[in-house]
Amino acid sequence: MGQLQLPERFLWQPRVKPTGPVVIDRNNSITNGLRLCQLYGEYGTRNLVTSEDLGSTAVDFGYGRHGGFFKSPSYTGDNFVAAPAFDTTNWAGVSIVQLFLFDTTDPFPSLAYSGPTGGFFGNWYISRSGSGLEVRFGNDSGAFGLTLNAVADDLVYSAFTYDLAVESVWGAVNNGPLKINTNATTAAFAGVADKNHIGFGPSGEGRSWLKPIFYTFIFDRALTTAEVKSLYADPYQILKPSVPLVAFTSSAGLDNNRISSMHFQRHYEPIAMGT
């Protein structure tokens, strides 16, 4: 009985939330500078970049239409998934990419926060504003945002990039057109932040995100326009199966009934297929 290694194009389904074991695909140049990759669901709070389990405080995990997620059960108390205590001193910039359902329950629910205890300003602070999103990078006291015309439970793809000279906010609603807004700023990072949270804002001022967040990617550089668009078209391209699929053959040829892998269990519908 022989053994056949299937070409990777037959094994991996882009734009689909992976359910089997995966690792970062370092052959994909987008992964340059990737510091945090969290998928939630069966991956819990593990950072796929380092395999470190970062932990969480008072959040709910589950599965929905777009895959595994976490969300806050309420606005009371600290409800968040932890992010690493990044030292951003020598970072060339930052990019934060997330997929989530829009939350309109509270005036300013927060998607991500990295900064000093009890204040907005540090590395970044991302929250909802009206029907869109806003972000603060570094010590810039002015909020900068993008209007998306999103309503509760809309699926939103967002990317926030900052190259220490220009900040950009990207967003798309329900797989629609990808919008962008840019602004010149020279906000400085705080170095090592006191708090690093996904789904919750600053202590004393924060707001939890009550709707599902499906994934979070953080980079120590500003993604290019092409990279942001590429991740929107296929967010899971930076991952690959940790164990290749193997098919066994006999003299009768390929026996499809004997192909086995966790990757053919449960898949979710395609997401973020806009242009």
Image (cartoon, rainbow, N blue to C red):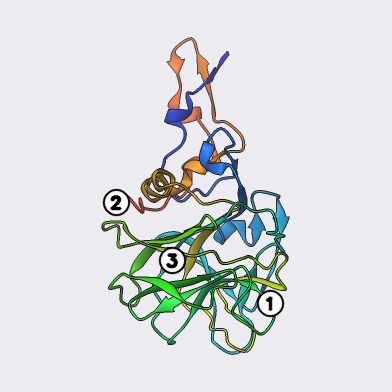
Left or right of 120 in this view: 15: left
User: Spatial distance from mark 1 to mark 3, Cα to Cα?
Assistant: 25 Å
Q: Is residue 157 left or right of residue 81?
A: left
Q: Amino acid at mark 1?
A: Pro
When the figure is inspected, residue 31 is found, relative to residue 174, above or below; the finding is above
Relative image position of residue 76 (x, y in whole percent) = 59, 90
Q: Is residue 82 above or below residue 78?
A: above
SS at circle 2: loop
Residue beneath disc 3: 100
Residue at mark 2: 274
Residue at label 1?
Answer: 116
Mark 1 or mark 3, whichever is nearer to me: 1
Q: Are marks 1 and 2 in contact (CB under 8 Å)?
A: no
As displayed, is residue 62 above or below residue 275? below
| Mark earlier in primary sequence (1, 2) | 1
x and y, in percent, of residue 114 in the image: 63, 70
Give the quarter of the figure containing the N terminus. top right
